[in-house]
Amino acid sequence: MTVRQPRYSKEEFARRGHEVYESQVRSQIEEGNHGKIVAIDIETGAFEVADDSLTAAKQLLIRFPDAQIFGIRIGHRAVHRFGFRSPSCRVRSLMQVLLLY
């Protein structure tokens, strides 16, 4: 089993992920996909949309086995929310989930 390692700091990873989402992906997927998950390879700009994080990530990894995957829930600021709604929610990377997979 291959162990995937992030190649960027958390800050750089998030910056690149948001940049690719806003500049390349959002306009293509936002309409009709509200609430779904998009998994984005921050190096290639390739992406997959699915109902859940794991499915989106797996679909992307089939095409790009070495992808650096950033995930976001379409139309929301973060993939998941824990506890009460905070005004300073942070976007989490799917890479954290994939390292356990």
Image: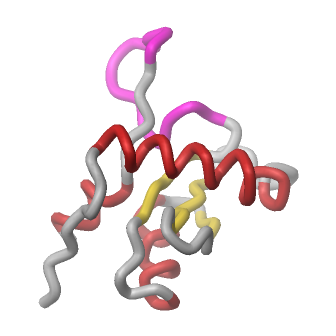
- Where is the N terminus found, in terms of image quarters? bottom left
Tell me if residue 77 comes above or below residue 70 in the rendering.
above
The image position of residue 80, as x and y in percent, is 43, 38
Question: What range is drawn magenta here?
Answer: 76-88
Provide the major secondary structure of the magenta segment: loop
> Residue at image x 29%, y 43%?
10
Along the viewing direction, whichever of 75 and 7 lies nearer the viewer:
7
Query: Colour scheme of this structure image?
Result: secondary structure
- Where is the C terminus found, in terms of image quarters? bottom left
Task: Examine the structure image and report whether residue 10 is included in the region drawn in magenta.
Answer: no
Task: Examine the structure image and report whether residue 86 is included in the region drawn in magenta.
Answer: yes
The image position of residue 11, as x and y in percent, is 35, 38
In this image, 86 relative to 47: left or right?
left
Residue 37 visible from this viewpoint: yes
Along the viewing direction, whichever of 90 and 80 lies nearer the viewer:
90
Tell me if residue 5 comes above or below residue 77 in the rendering.
below
> Residue at image x 78%, y 58%?
29
Tell me if residue 83 comes above or below residue 17 in the rendering.
above
> Residue at image x 74%, y 51%?
23
Along the viewing direction, whichever of 18 and 90 lies nearer the viewer:
18
> Residue at image x 46%, y 86%?
64
